[in-house]
Amino acid sequence: MHTLICGSIAYDNIMVFQGQFKEHILPDKIHVLNVAFLVPEMRREFGGCAGNIAYNLRMIGGKPLIMATVGDDYQPYDYRLKKLDLLQTHIRHVKDTFTAQAFITTDLDDNQITAFHPGAMNFSHQNAVTDATDIRLGIIAPDGRDGMLQHAREFHESGIPFLFDPGQGLPMFNGEELLDFIIKADYIAVNDYEGQMLQERTGRALESLAKETKALIITKGSQGSVIYTDGKEIKIPSVKPKAIVDPTGCGDAYRAGLLHGIANDMDWQTIGQLGSLMGALKIAERGGQNHHFSQDEIDQLYFDNFGSRVL
Ligand SMILES: Nc1ncnc2c1ncn2[C@@H]1O[C@H](COP(=O)(O)OP(=O)(O)OP(=O)(O)O)[C@@H](O)[C@H]1O
Ligand SMILES: [Mg+2]
């Protein structure tokens, strides 16, 4: 049985300007802003929440099935997923579009100017959850707005439990829509900031929203995470990372741990700890998919941190 991963496939283009934006963006000239930054250093990372989550889930022995839409420039990602032996049955090519991509320019003060082009992602509603077979669990990660709404409806109508992970897509929905997602979903995962926004938009406290689900998970970066389930609050500690290099994609790595734990009927303490370990392994590498570990290595690291075996 597979876990269906609905969300984006994207490229992240990261450029480093060897200066300071503030030397070039002058407050008295802001009405005629026209700046060009020479960026000798550039990387292109494989990203998108669905790509990242599937990558991590595969690493710990899960069976992810990605459901996403991609554009004419998909070929490098296609090659990569083939190499990783990740199924592409439900990755749909939308003609005359680009694959979703972010263009991130940072300066030496770590300021960022980002442009995000959703491209093919805005056609995610062309895929239907019901197209996929042999699914026992799913996740709705940030994706096109119509697609997210439709996929929630389809999971719900098919009786397939799913995790709602609105992430940076959360601001697209009003309180009523968010509440509808929460009622349909079995599990919710958000970071601290998104949890705050969820409360503001729905007008309900986390403890109250948790009652609509089997579990509501809040991640808090280096502060670990909290799982609200069954009227209880389970605190999950963070794992000390080998190095703190790049937090991008920690949330996705954590979610792979959640999905694997849920699919294998683990208890919530173990599920959270597996997520926490995955987040810490991710943060030591740049990009969302450049950390490599075997299942045995992850199992050993889990044992070193928590004193039991998990995989
Ligand atoms: N500095 C850190 N040290 C240890 N663990 C971390 C750190 N940052 C993140 N993690 C782990 O990863 C989990 C998810 O991180 P976080 O709460 O930052 O998610 P996020 O804000 O959704 O991240 P993103 O959207 O950038 O991927 C945390 O709950 C924690 O377990
Ligand atoms: Mg996140």
Image (spheres, rainbow, N blue to C red):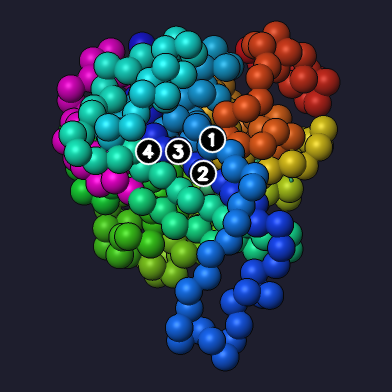
The spot of residue 239 in percent (x, y) is 77, 35
Precedes in sequence: disc 3 or disc 1: 3
Marker disc for residue 8:
4
What segment is highlighted magenta in the picture? 118-139
Precedes in sequence: disc 4 or disc 2: 4
- Label 3, label 4: how far apart the Cα atoms are: 10 Å
Q: Are marks 3 and 2 in contact (CB under 8 Å)?
A: yes
- Label 1, label 2: how far apart the Cα atoms are: 6 Å
Give the labeled residue for mark 1. 45
Task: Say whether mark 1 is within 8 Å of ligand 1.
Answer: no
Give the position of the N terminus as an image quadrant: top left
The quarter of the picture where residue 130 lies is top left
Query: Dot 4 surroundings within 10 Å: few (below 14), some, or many (20 or more)?
Result: many
Q: Residue at x 64, y 45 (%)?
A: 41
Give the labeled residue for mark 2. 13
Q: Are marks 3 and 1 in contact (CB under 8 Å)?
A: yes
